[in-house]
Image: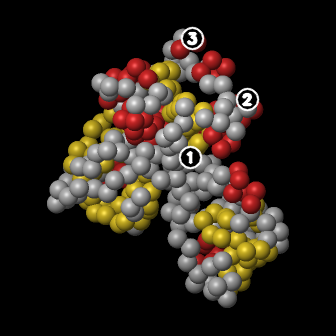
Amino acid sequence: MEEQTLTLKIAERIEEPGNIVRLRLVDPEGAALPKFEAGAHLDLHLRDGALDLWRQYSLCSDPAETGFYEIGVLLDPKTRGGSSAVHRLAVPGARFEVEGPRNHFPLAEDAETTVLFGGGIGVTPMLAMAQRLHALGRDFTLHYCTRSRDRTAFRTVIEQAPWAESVVFHFDDGDDAQRLDLARDLPPPGKNTHLYVCGPEGFMDWLIGYAEANGHDGGTVHREYFSADIDASGDTFEVEARLSGVTVTIGPEDTIAKALARAGVKIEVKCEEGVCGTCVTDVLEGTPDHRDKFLTDEEREEGTMICACCSRACTSRLVLDI
Ligand code: FES
């Protein structure tokens, strides 16, 4: 997939229920946008005075559409300012520097059974997946969990979609029969059965834990965390940046990326909470103590990569290929 830095303009801002804005982004000159795969996200550069952040937002529009991109952004007071900046700055006509689209949540398009689980704003990548699966003529089910019918973003979009009958809504304030029931709603495991999960961390951990405990192989349970409550603190250790010829000490509250940056070795960082993968760096020696939500279980076991924004070391020394 093509990936580049773009300047995009907000063409439309739609207020969805539940403090979510749906933003339509276009090329300012009307040019066609790079194609994207279902599950892909954009990195949005948010700048306003002292604010200078990159944040990741899943594309929820039709992957076949090259005239515009759409993203949905929840105003979340618990996060570190990214969502409030989007809600403040993203007015029609505003321009943003954007990187991507890039995809860490790809769809297995040839799966026999595909079940999508979106919790709240975690429905956004599922909307792109639903459109792609429908275009491919594949059967799928999207389980969409929200607090209440009235606070369900994208409900109108979904109800008017040609794939609306593949969507099952679950409302927290509804009766028990319509709530998500994994004993009933999870398909039987199988190597051609793929599950996709995105939503709040607790929702994801619960669902993934249940699926894996009931026989779904980790490789068929696809996940994308959009934020994580990680603990990046721990014991002191040393990091050698071998190509740079620099060794630093990482204190209990420090991170590899920050300590190396102070020593002049730059590792690009975006989310700073182990979900976007921007800071992934190769490990040459030592054992990582993974704190991120980005690497797969297999990648963790291999131990050859580390998220330098938050992960630490099980050994007293790590050697990185940077
Ligand atoms: S900067 Fe996003 S995972 Fe490290």
Mark 1, Cα crowd under 10 Å, few <14 / some 14-19 / many 20+, is many
Residue 275 image offset from top left, x and y in percent: 57, 54
> Which of pointers 3 and 2 indicates the residue nearer the eye?
2
- Mark 2 burial class by Cα count in 10 Å: few <14, some 14-19, many 20+: few
Between 84 and 17, the one lying in front of the other is 17
Mark 3 crowdedness (10 Å alpha carbons): few <14, some 14-19, many ≥20: few
Mark sitting on residue 214: 2
Q: Is residue 12 visible to the viewer in this orientation of the structure?
A: yes
Marks 1 and 2, how far apart in space?
Answer: 21 Å
Seen from the viewer's position, the closer of residues 234 and 42 is 42
Label for residue 177? 3
For the rendered model, the colour scheme is: secondary structure
Q: In this image, 220 relative to 60: left or right?
A: right
Of the two numbered discs 1 and 2 in the rendering, the one whose residue sits closer to the viewer: 2
The one nearer the camera, 114 or 77, is 114
Picture quarter with the C terminus? bottom right
Check the image and name the residue furthest to the bottom: 245
The residue tagged with tag 1: helix, strand or loop?
loop
